Amino acid sequence: MMVLYHGTDMTSALSIIYDGIDLTKSKPRLDFGNGFYLGDDYAAAKKWATRFPNIVGVVLAYSMSFEGLKIKIFDSASKEWGEEVFANRFNHKTKSSDIDCIIGPIADGRMQFLLQKVDDKRMSKQQFIEAITPMIPSVQYVMKTTKAVQNLKLLRKDVLA
């Protein structure tokens, strides 16, 4: 078992707590595609939850068992990691479509800038893959399937003032 954190706003936290994790509510064009994103760094989850002024942030803490799950792990910002991020950010089919959970580095904060360059045809796929770098030391854990979500057990919710 390990503890993972999900930083969010109060409205979303209440929906998650009372209605359950809904994988269809995932935002599009994320590093590892649709899924429920968590991290192992409480401070990073807190920062994410409080990124907007005048919004009450919440950090949800979960225990996670990976037993019985198909897991894809990217240990570093390898070419394979870059190709996975590119494919997911541009809604292409990926090699990880049958995976329950993906673990890997978080792409850096320049992502929107790089995505726009690709969208505008000012950057190729290869240039994009070479340009992205991970946010060190942050690692993301993405639950891609209901089976993975069922392995999460809510431990607590921390309301951030």
Image: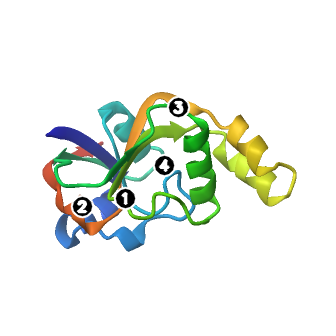
Quadrant in the picture for residue 9: bottom left
Upstream in sequence: badge 1 or badge 2 = 1
The quadrant the N terminus occupies is top left
Mark nearest the camera among 4 and 3 is 3
Mark nearest the camera among 3 and 1 is 1
User: Percent x, y for residue 12?
Assistant: 33, 63
Instruction: Identify the residue position indicated by label 1 in the image.
Output: 99
CA distance for labels 3 and 1: 23 Å
* Kind of residue at badge 2: Val
CA distance for labels 4 and 3: 20 Å
Q: Say left or right for 72 vs 125.
A: left
Of 32 and 5, the residue lying toward us: 32
The label shown at residue 52 is 4
CA distance for labels 2 and 3: 25 Å
Label 1 with label 2: CB-CB less than 8 Å:
no
Instruction: Identify the residue position indicated by label 2 in the image.
Output: 149
Mark nearest the camera among 4 and 1 is 1
Upstream in sequence: badge 4 or badge 3 = 4
CA distance for labels 1 and 2: 12 Å
Upstream in sequence: badge 2 or badge 3 = 3
Let me know if residue 160 appears in the view. Answer: no
Upstream in sequence: badge 3 or badge 1 = 1
Of 96 and 102, the residue lying toward us: 96
* Kind of residue at badge 4: Phe
